[in-house]
Image (cartoon, rainbow, N blue to C red):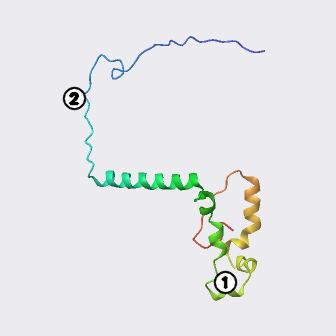
Amino acid sequence: MHEHWSADAPCYDTKPPFLDGRVVFTKQAEPIMPLKDPTSDMAIISRKGLNLVRELHEKQIVGEVDFKEEAKFGKHMKKGEAVSDFAKSKSLSQQRRYLPIFYIQDELLQVKRENQVVVVIGETGSGKRT
């Protein structure tokens, strides 16, 4: 059988003193007006940036600029050439066998199957991403 029980919890609608409007916690009567200096470095940089954005927007409207095509990183990677003798003499799959992570690959895949989130920590070049 299920027991039925209840409890009364009082609920008070109270506001902290700094929100109720009765007490003023600042000695400053009026807000501070921001100082605008058109010769400041930030003002000059923002104007230059605004002009650059305007020019790019106009080029995009005319069709001279394709941001998606220019932002692709893959096309730059395809031009890369091997720099070391090791990279020149071994295939990509052979290079991966020399990575420290290669020897625990099966264990790592098992951990990945058993867990939703796996954090892999290692030195640069140890094969974490591979």
Rendered view: 90 above or below 116: below
Q: Amino acid at mark 1?
A: Ala
The residue under the point 63% across, 63% down is 72
- Lateral position of residue 88 relative to residue 17, left or right: right
The residue tagged 1 is: 87
Residue 126 placement: quadrant: bottom right
Tell me if residue 60 comes above or below residue 104 in the rendering: above
Q: Which residue shows up at 75% across the image and 62% down it?
A: 109
| Residue 22: numbered disc | none
Q: Circle 2 is placed at which residue position?
A: 28
Going by the picture, which residue comes out furthest to the front?
Answer: 62
Residue 26 image position (x, y, % from top left): 25, 27
Q: Residues under labels 2 and 1: Cα distance?
A: 68 Å
Q: Callout 1: helix, strand or loop?
A: helix
Residue located at (32% from left, 18% from top):
21
User: At which x and y percent is residue 87?
Assistant: 67, 83
The one of 34 and 97 positioned closer to us in this rendering: 34
Q: Dividing the picture into quarters, in which one does residue 128 lie? A: bottom right
Question: In this orientation, which residue lies closer to the viewer: 23 or 70?
Answer: 70
Q: Is residue 120 visible?
A: no
Q: Nearer the viewer, residue 4 or 43?
A: 43
Amino acid at circle 2: Gln
Task: Give coordinates of residue 20: x percent, y percent.
Answer: 35, 17
Q: Is residue 49 left or right of residue 29?
A: right
Query: Disc 2 on helix, strand or loop?
Result: loop
